[in-house]
Structure formats: structure tokens, C-alpha cells
Amino acid sequence: MSRKNKQQQQKKQSPTKFKLPDENNNDLEEDDEDDPPLTKSTLDQLLKKHFSQIQKGLDDTISKLQANLDSVSLIADNAIKLAEKLEKELSRCQSSIKELAKENSELKKQLNTNTKNIKQIEERIEERTNRQLRKTLVFKGIEEKLPEPPEPTDALDPSADTTNRSANSTSAKETWAETEEILAQHIADICEIEVEEATKMIDRCHLSAPNPNYKGKNPRPIFAAFYCWKESQYVLDEFRKNNIANKDSKVSCENKYGPLTTRRRNLALAERKSLKDKGEIINGYIAFPAKLMVRTTPRSKYFMIKDFTTTQIEFGKRD
């Protein structure tokens, strides 16, 4: 081998030297004394070491990501199960709502039917009540018996009995017998008959119960049941004739009706008063059960202007 070829072969086998960065000027300088030569095997070891570290970091990251993915998957699975459960519950609720809506509709129909039945029963009861009260008349404007004044007592005498006042005030209340006597006298005067005959017409009578809410001064009405319907109608006609002949008479008589008919007739009376105040009618009366009959001129005939017979009545707490 020639000398030239030997030199070239030595150059190929000699280790390659690199300049490492300096701390001060970052220049690559050759340091033959401190740094060992960087051979291919050393570089391979460094690469393997760094690759191993990178691989380990990647493995750790992948493991963490896998754990997070497993956790997210678990949460997603739970959410899916919860959604399925809620969907089933929603479906059950919708079914329940449909059933309740159907039941509510049926209850409304039943309520309407029951309400109609109740109204029909009320009207039948009202009709029978009116029939039972055909012989009962209501007399208004008859003065009640005045209470007797208490006996005078000596207020300065300590031995005086002060209990007589309360006893007198209690005994001063008008009894049903006294009411019957007073009513019979009025019937006898207006019908021009004997008091004894008027008394025989009356089956029973009494004053209405006191109304604590009434603030007026008119006497309480008298309810009187007659033995005979014809006699009651005779008395009713005579009192009406007396009222027509004597416009200033405060005593009146009318039939007694059930609560529904009474309220309806009161509505008709209020309507009659309103029409008279407006000058739209000159007179009117209430025909049974609650028909408002009026006339607009003195020579015109009475005609029904409004019928309150089927007006729905709602009773409140004070009724």
C-alpha cells in the first residue's frame, strides 16, 4: 500500500472532533483536553436515552389521556343511562298527563251533568215549595205591638227590685196570639167582615225573625197560613183593591214564595222601578212566577216586557 493511501485510511479512522458551545460567547470551540470525543456509539446512546425519555413521557401522557378518556367515557355512559331513564320517566309522565286530561274531561262532563241535575232538582223543589205556600200570605206595613214601658222604680231605694225591667222587656215581645189578633183585625177592616170570621180563616201566623242587618224603621212582615186557598186569594184581592183605592196605604199583602222565586220577583221589581224612573212605562206588576208585566200608556194593555222565571240565582253568605 502506498503511503498516500495509508494517510487517507488513517484520516477515515480518526475520530471526528466537534466544537461545543462556550458559556460566554456561544461559539463552537474545539476542546481536546476536557471533552471526550463524540463518537457514533456515544451519539446512538444519547439518542436512545433521549428517545427513551421522550417515549416514557409520551407513554405517561397517553396513560393520563387514556385515564381521562375512561373517566369521560364513564361520565358519558352515566349520562346516557340517565337520559334513557329520564326519557322513560318523561314518557310515563306524558302518559299520565294524557290519562289525567281524559279523566279531567270526563269529570268536567260529569260536573256539567251534575250541575244541570242539581238545577233541575232545585227548580222542582222550588215548584213544590211554591205549591205548599199557595195558602200562605205575607202582610207588610202592619205596626207591631208597642212594648209596655217598665214600671217605675225608686232609684234611690237600694231595696228596690231592678229585675222587673228585664222581665217587662222580655214579656213585652209580641206573641203569635197577639200577632193573630192584630192581623185578624186588619183583615176584618179591609174585607169588611167580622173579626171572628177573619180569625177562623187563619191557620197560624207569626212575625218574621229580626234582621240584625236591617237599619230601617218599617215593621216586620207577618207570615200567615190560611186554612183555605180560596179564602187566602179572597183576602189577597181585597188588600190589592184597597191599595189601588188608597194610594197612601202602607199595608200590603202578597203571596209567599220560595227563595228562588222571591229573588227573581225582587229582580223584576227592581227592573219595574228602573223603567218607571226613566219614564218608559206608567205602571207594571209581577205575574207568577216572575214575569214583569207593564203598560206604556193609560189605555194600552199589559204585556210582558221581561221574564225572570229562569234567571239563575246564586245565594251568597248573607242570603
Image (tube, rainbow, N blue to C red):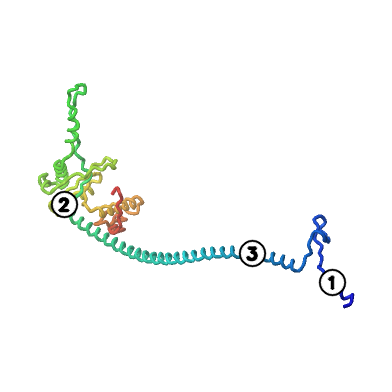
Circle 1 crowding by C-alpha within 10 Å: few under 14, some 14–19, many from 20: few
Q: What secondary structure is found at the residue carrying circle 1?
A: helix
Residue pushed farthest front? 1
What residue lies at 17% left-to-right and 23% top-to-bottom?
159
Residue pushed farthest bottom? 1
Residue nearest the observer in this picture, 52 or 283: 52
Q: Which residue is mark 1?
A: 10
2 or 1: mark nearer the eye: 1
2 or 3: mark nearer the eye: 3
What residue lies at 16% left-to-right and 52% top-to-bottom?
232
Circle 2 crowding by C-alpha within 10 Å: few under 14, some 14–19, many from 20: many
Please determine whether, in this image, residue 144 is positioned above or below residue 51. above
Residue 240 in the image, given as x and y percentages of width and height: 21, 50
Image-based side of 205 in relation to 292, left or right: left
Evaluate if marks 1 and 3 touch, with contact meaning CB atoms under 8 Å apart: no
| Residue type at tag 3 | Lys
Circle 3 crowding by C-alpha within 10 Å: few under 14, some 14–19, many from 20: few
1 or 3: mark nearer the eye: 1
Q: Quadrant of residue 158?
A: top left
Give the position of the N terminus as an image quadrant.
bottom right
Residue pushed farthest right? 3
Residue nearest the observer in this picture, 50 or 34: 34
Image-based side of 82 in relation to 150, left or right: right
Residue 241 in the image, given as x and y percentages of width and height: 20, 50
Q: Which residue is mark 3?
A: 56
Q: Earlier in the sequence, mark 2 or mark 1?
A: 1
